[in-house]
């Protein structure tokens, strides 16, 4: 369980294009991640106050996000500004969606599921910003850590090298092999479900496709049934 | 009476695939509404005379009667578009288009079935079908991750083809059968690009952003 003051990743920056939204779950909490037309990312509770529709199903118009059901539209502070069924209504200030702190760093959108009063941990620095991919797998973060301790990374054509794993924070891991540095921003979705947002250092641009294939194979390893010998 | 007739049900996703193709190519056509739910009209003798499988969609083009969604898409894209942009014939591209078009009829059959169980209450094991559908969507997402890295936005060519068209509804409608879009960033990107193609139209279950 992460502390509420911790920064947790919800997406690769590149995956949330301006004017779009997506859902993300962090330890069971449903969130909407959206980016306004000016390029600013927002993370909110994924629930419309009207009838509870998920805001991630909605659509972004400029610096507002509108709910898919009845079109209620919210500004960047989460405040409802427009109700199509009552266009002349001065919308009450109480119709508001809970918003969370957002920082973008190193190609990742981070959020903090805490109230402003709680002191924030520093943002993890990983020193990479070339997106490889987000990989979703049905396993625990602890299991992923155990598997990644023994992984081999592609470092050239048909060449792999044993990687050194470092845990920067519970949500930020790095892997190094030769000149290659990889970072993994770890999103814990549930007890047996994680999202790994993977980035490489800028010098490794030619390895991105090989790293994406490595990640695909990693998911097989992460989801392979654990043998008795391994448990013992 | 126009040359082309589509035997259609508005909530059927395979009919939607054909409606999309007709719309992209701007082909004038007539629609005959078939009472698939709850009437099972497509399984009655009159419709079985056109398609012995008793399924929709069916397309009549002059004297030609075609069933099988992917066959109809192939027919429309070659017979009614001189340039054949939706089904390019350059050999390597054609083969890739075929691979992914068949994927929509084979690996994604469980997704189509899952939606029928969820939306129409057809008998079936929704949980098992959904699990299988998720695996197929993962394969598609993995593919599009690599395509994007290679600088392409479409499944099989540098432009959209019937491969994209036949795969897309299973993802666009996945919430109907309980699979969210959260885990498929590369497919979200692809869907957004597909939605803005001239001629795109929605169906119930695919949000129309008003
Ligand atoms: S549920 Fe969001 S506007 Fe009605």
Image (cartoon, coloured by chain):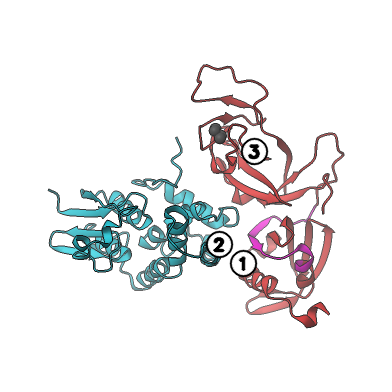
Chain colours: A red, B cyan
The answer to which quarter of the image holds residue A152 is bottom right
Question: Looking at this view, is B184 or B155 the one in front?
Answer: B184
Residue at horizontal 84%, vertical 80%? A232
Category of crowding for the residue at label 1, using alpha-carbon neighbours closer than 10 angstroms: few (below 14), some (14–19), many (at least 20)? many
User: Dot 1 falls on which chain?
Assistant: A
Rendering quadrant holding ligand 1: top right
Label 3 secondary element: loop
Is A227 situated above or below A205? below
Region of the chain picked out in magenta, as a range: A125-144
Can you see residue B181? yes
Residue A40, which numbered label? Answer: 3
Residue at left offset 67%, top offset 79%:
A159
Q: Name the residue at 55% across, 17% down.
A: A89
Above/below status of A80 relative to B102:
above
Chain at tag 3: A
Quarter of the rendering occupied by the N terminus of chain A: bottom right
State the image coordinates of residue A147 (x, y, percent, origin top left).
76, 72
Residue A226 lies within the magenta run: no
């Amino acid at each position: 369980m992460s502390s509420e003051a911790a920064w947790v990743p919800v997406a690769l920056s590149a995956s949330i294009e301006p004017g779009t939204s997506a859902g993300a779950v962090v330890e069971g909490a449903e969130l909407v991640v959206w980016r306004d037309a000016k390029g600013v990312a927002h993370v909110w509770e994924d629930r419309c106050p009207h009838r509870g529709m998920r805001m991630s199903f909605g659509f972004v118009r400029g610096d507002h996000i509108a709910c898919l059901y009845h079109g209620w539209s919210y500004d960047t502070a989460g405040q409802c500004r427009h109700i199509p069924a009552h266009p002349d209504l001065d919308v009450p200030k109480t119709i508001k969606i809970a918003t969370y702190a957002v920082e973008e760093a190193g190609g990742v959108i981070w959020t903090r599921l805490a109230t402003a009063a709680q002191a924030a941990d520093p943002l993890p620095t990983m020193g990479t910003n070339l997106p490889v991919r987000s990989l979703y797998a049905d396993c625990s973060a602890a299991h992923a850590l155990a598997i990644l301790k023994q992984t081999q990374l592609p470092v050239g054509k048909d060449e792999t090298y044993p990687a050194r794993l470092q845990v920067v924070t519970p949500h930020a891991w790095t892997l190094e092999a030769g000149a290659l540095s990889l970072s993994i921003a770890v999103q814990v979705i549930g007890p047996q479900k994680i999202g790994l947002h993977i980035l490489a250092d800028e010098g490794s641009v030619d390895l991105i496709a090989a790293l994406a294939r490595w990640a695909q194979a990693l998911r097989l390893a992460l989801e392979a049934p654990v043998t008795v010998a391994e448990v013992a | 009476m126009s040359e082309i007739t589509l035997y259609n049900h508005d909530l059927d996703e395979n009919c939607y695939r054909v409606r999309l193709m007709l719309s992209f190519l701007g082909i004038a056509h007539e629609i005959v509404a078939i009472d698939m739910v709850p009437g099972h009209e497509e399984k009655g003798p009159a419709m079985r005379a056109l398609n012995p499988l008793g399924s929709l969609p069916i397309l009549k083009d002059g004297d030609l009667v075609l069933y099988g969604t992917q066959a109809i898409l192939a027919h429309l894209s070659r017979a009614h578009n001189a340039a054949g942009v939706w089904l390019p014939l350059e050999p390597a591209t054609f083969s890739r288009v075929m691979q992914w078009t068949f994927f929509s009829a084979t690996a994604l059959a469980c997704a189509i079935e899952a939606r029928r169980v969820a939306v129409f209450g057809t008998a079936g094991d929704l949980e098992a079908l959904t699990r299988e559908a998720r695996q197929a969507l993962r394969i598609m997402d993995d593919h599009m991750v690599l395509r994007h890295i290679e600088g392409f936005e479409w499944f099989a060519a540098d432009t959209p083809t019937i491969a994209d068209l036949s795969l897309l509804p299973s993802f666009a409608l996945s919430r109907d059968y309980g699979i969210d879009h959260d885990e498929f960033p590369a497919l979200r990107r692809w869907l957004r690009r597909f939605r803005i193609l001239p001629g795109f139209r929605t169906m119930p279950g695919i949000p129309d952003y008003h």
